[in-house]
Image: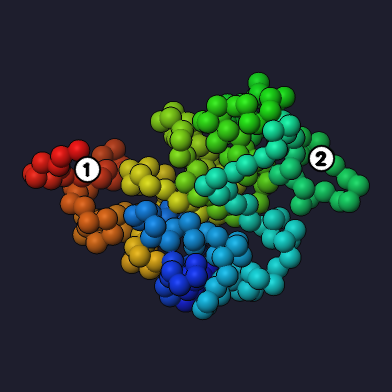
Amino acid sequence: MLNAQHVSAAYGKLDVLRDVTIAFQPGRFTAIAGPNGCGKSSLLKAIMGFLPLSKGEILLEGKPILGIGKKALARRIAYLPQECFCPDYMTLGELIELAGHSRYGLIGGPSERDRALYAQVLKTVGLSDRAGFPVNKLSGGQRQRAWIAMVLAQDTDIILMDEPVNHLDVTYQFSVLELVRELVEHHGKTVVAVLHDLNLTTAFADDVVLMRAGECLTAGVVAQTITPENIAKVFDLKTQVFERDGRLVCFPERSKQAVSC
């Protein structure tokens, strides 16, 4: 459904993606992991057309994504960046309604189905009682959940999420990723998310892409890709990886050398 073929990109003279080729499998949850600055976010921006390519192309169902109009693309792919902003006057309810803009006509508005969907996503992220609140008056964690609700309310086949559980406490980290699993398993959504926590990756993702220095070092099914050898190559970290209750657990080994702070 969605793939990158020999993609390279740069910010000025700084190469951020180097000959990246990845096929994201439809109806699965793919996590992208790797050290800070390795190109994870840049890959999502390249898919959305926000980062010009110096080489290669992004294809959606075999067609170059650059040839798809913005409104048509918004009906196919929802994107949650790391940082989101809105005007001070905008309420949470108004923000959520923006999610359906690509489905409305010039003089149309939300349908009954849309409104039911908006109510459901607000309930899912625990903000049903905050619909009338200005978004910028919410706490940091609540704002993050508000933006996640907006992306979910866009109701697309493909969802790209850049660190979706950043700034959330552990309860909502699991709540959001459990929702992602439900979208994949019961609604056939294709989800690609940047995740920093390898244990959240092994708990929720089907597939994983491991990146370093702008390159895709390895990709595949989580159970076959999250190995001590691959983690060492990507993160320079020695770990134990073992199975517990049907999922892999990554346990970093402490360095014997004391580190002074």
Q: Can residue 185 be seen from the camera position used here?
A: no
Between residues 188 and 170, which one lies in front from this camera angle?
A: 170
Between residues 193 and 143, which one lies in front from this camera angle?
A: 143
Residue 102: % across, % down: 76, 52
| Circle 1: element type | strand
| Image marks 1 and 2: residues in contact by CB distance under 8 Å | no
The three-letter code of the residue at mark 2 reads Pro
Residue in the picture at 46% in, 35% down: 167
Q: Is residue 253 left or right of residue 124?
A: left
* Image quarter (top left, top right, bottom left or bottom right) of the C terminus: top left
Q: Quadrant of residue 137?
A: top right
Residue 3: % across, % down: 53, 68
Q: Can residue 229 be seen from the camera position used here?
A: yes
Residue 173: % across, % down: 45, 35
The three-letter code of the residue at mark 1 reads Phe
Query: Which residue is identified by label 1?
Result: 251
Q: Earlier in the sequence, mark 1 or mark 2?
A: 2
